[in-house]
Structures are given as C-alpha cells and as structure tokens.
Image: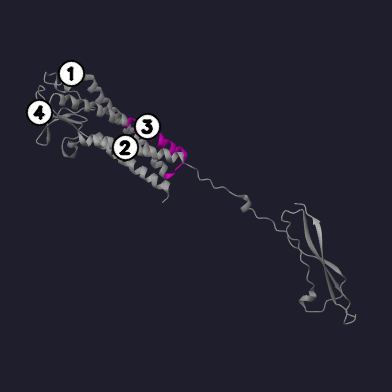
Amino acid sequence: MSYKKFVFFINLFFLLGATLLTFFLILAGGKNTGVLKNFYWFQASTSGFNSAPSVTRWYNYNWCGWEIRRAVNCSSKMAAQPFSPRDNFGSSTLMPSTFLNNRNTYYYLSRVGWAMLLIALFFLLITLVSVFASLIRYTRPTATLATAMSWITLFFMTLSACLYTGCYAKAVRAFHHEDRDARLGPKNFGFIWTTVFLLIVNSICTTVMVATYKRNEYIYDRSFASTKTVESQTSTPVPSAYASNRALPPVSAAEVQQPQPRSNGKFFKKFRVKKRTVTNPGDEPDQTQEERIYTEQNVPVVT
C-alpha cells in the first residue's frame, strides 16, 4: 500500500470515529436509563435550591435528580435545555450569586454551545460524504471540498467544546466557592475534546493530501512510439543461373554499390565501391579470373 493510500484510510478512520462520538454527544440525555444516563454535562449538589433535588445532573434535553445511581424526578424534555439554576429551580438565597447576577452568561453559553454542536454535525456529514466520493474517484474538486468541509467542521466543533467547557467550568468554580460538590461529566467532555483532536488530524491530513495532489498524467512520448522508416537496401538481383547451378554467362565489368551506412549526424560519409572484373572463359588459365578493387569516396550527406 502506498503512503498516500495509508494516509487516506487513516484519515477516513479518524473521521468515522469523530462522527460516532458526535452522535453520542447529540444523543446524551435522550434517555435517562441504560448507558445514556451516564452521559451528562454537569453534576452538582443543589440541596436547598427551593424544590431542587439534593444532587442534580444536566443533560442535553433535561435535568434530573441523581439518587442511588439512577435518574429521578426529571424535568420535561426540550431541545437545547439551558444550564441556569435560576431558571431551573427559581431564585434562592443559598444559590451561588453568580447564577443570580450573571444568569445570561450560563444560559447562552450552554444554548449556543448546543447550536454549534448541531452545526458541526451537519458539516461533519458533508465532510464524510465528500471523503467517500474521494474514495470512489480521487480528484482535485472532491479533495478540495473535503478539505474545506474538514476545517469548517473543526471550527464549529472547537467552538462548541470551548463554549461548553467555559460554561460548566465557571459553574464548577461557583459551586466550589460555596463549598458544594460539583464536577464535569467526564464522558461528554472526553468525547467532545477527543472529537476535536480527531478533526484536527483529519483536517491536517486532507490539507497535506490536496497540497501534494498531482494528477496522473500519462505523457505520450512520440519519439518512442513512432517507428522510423528504415531505408530499404537495394540488393543485387540474383541471376537465375545461381539457382540452377549453371555457369555464369559472360558479363561486362559493373560496379556494385554497397548499402550506405548511417551518417550519424556527419556531413560526409564514406561508402565503398566494389569493382568486379570478369574475364572471358576463353582466356589463358593462369590469367586472373577475378579482380576486386575497393575505393573510398567522401560523399556529402544532407540530414
């Protein structure tokens, strides 16, 4: 497997993990039984807050009392349930003053954090679709779309994590200031910041891949594909006497030109001229029957 394919599948694996964790965050509080009862944002001691339970947990869609490891006396469910003890239980003298004086801070931080989480999920699904499209056919437009959607998803997910963390971290300090027990939901915050980490890796990988993208270009070299026409060499016609093993008839002296070698880029080339002299069969036996003379001539070549 090549390096780019390895990075691509690691990127896809991280993206699928981020999508799964985000769905868990969205579903947290959908049910107050089973596994989902442990996915909460904040838990604090709220005894004395009018009719509030002694220990309260805040989920995405409602808040519930926590007794004997189960949720009891839950509020009615609503989308984007705000975190605001003043709105949830009413004003009380035992309530930390920050919830009374800075009510809007906690109210809008929790609700806007929920909205950013939904927007992040929307862009995360678009990113997932674009990555699957790149898996089918990796082109520059699909890679660019996946990269852009990855960074947008990372922005909204990080914004949501920061809003949630800022809201509930302030609440923890407020409760601790009044010597009350309070803590963040470890699963929800662990999931949301793990999702941010996975999206950071995903965004960096997609950016590197689109930056190093090189379209598969198959260069057709005509010099290798084309065939050069080889000059046909004119051979000396073979008399029929050779085929029938008969004696050669008397012929006059003739010049037979040998095939010319390639010029190899030279302006002049040399070729040999073969002169053959055949005497009459009626001459004396001691007379030379065949005489060969080779001469070299320089002939200009036009290339």
Q: Which of the two discs, 3 and 1, labels the residue nearer the N terminus?
A: 1
Q: Which of the two discs, 2 and 3, labels the residue nearer the N terminus?
A: 3
Q: Amino acid at mark 4?
A: Ser
Q: Which of the two discs, 2 and 1, labels the residue nearer the N terminus?
A: 1
Q: Does any portion of residue 57 appear in the rendered image?
A: no
Q: Is residue 106 above or below residue 297?
A: above
User: Mark 3 highlights which residue?
Assistant: 152
Front of the two marks 4 and 2: 2
Q: Which of the two discs, 3 and 4, labels the residue nearer the N terminus?
A: 4
User: Mark 2 highlights which residue?
Assistant: 197
User: Mark 1 highlights which residue?
Assistant: 100
| Residue shown at 44% from the left, 36% from the top | 144
Between the residue at mark 4 and the residue at mark 2, the CA separation in whole angstroms equals 36 Å
Between the residue at mark 2 and the residue at mark 3, the CA separation in whole angstroms equals 14 Å
**Circle 1 — which element?**
helix
Report the magenta residues as a range: 136-157
Between the residue at mark 4 and the residue at mark 1, the CA separation in whole angstroms equals 19 Å
Q: Nearer the viewer, residue 26 or 102?
A: 102
Q: Which of the two discs, 4 and 1, labels the residue nearer the N terminus?
A: 4
Q: Amino acid at mark 3?
A: Ile
User: Mark 4 highlights which residue?
Assistant: 54
Q: Quadrant of residue 122?
A: top left
Front of the two marks 3 and 1: 1
Q: Position of residue 5 (x, y in %)?
A: 41, 47
Between the residue at mark 2 and the residue at mark 1, the CA separation in whole angstroms equals 35 Å
- Tell which residue pokes out farthest to the top in this image: 101
The answer to whether the residues at label 4 and label 1 have Cβ atoms under 8 Å apart is no
Q: Amino acid at mark 1?
A: Leu
**Circle 3 — which element?**
helix
The answer to whether the residues at label 4 and label 2 have Cβ atoms under 8 Å apart is no
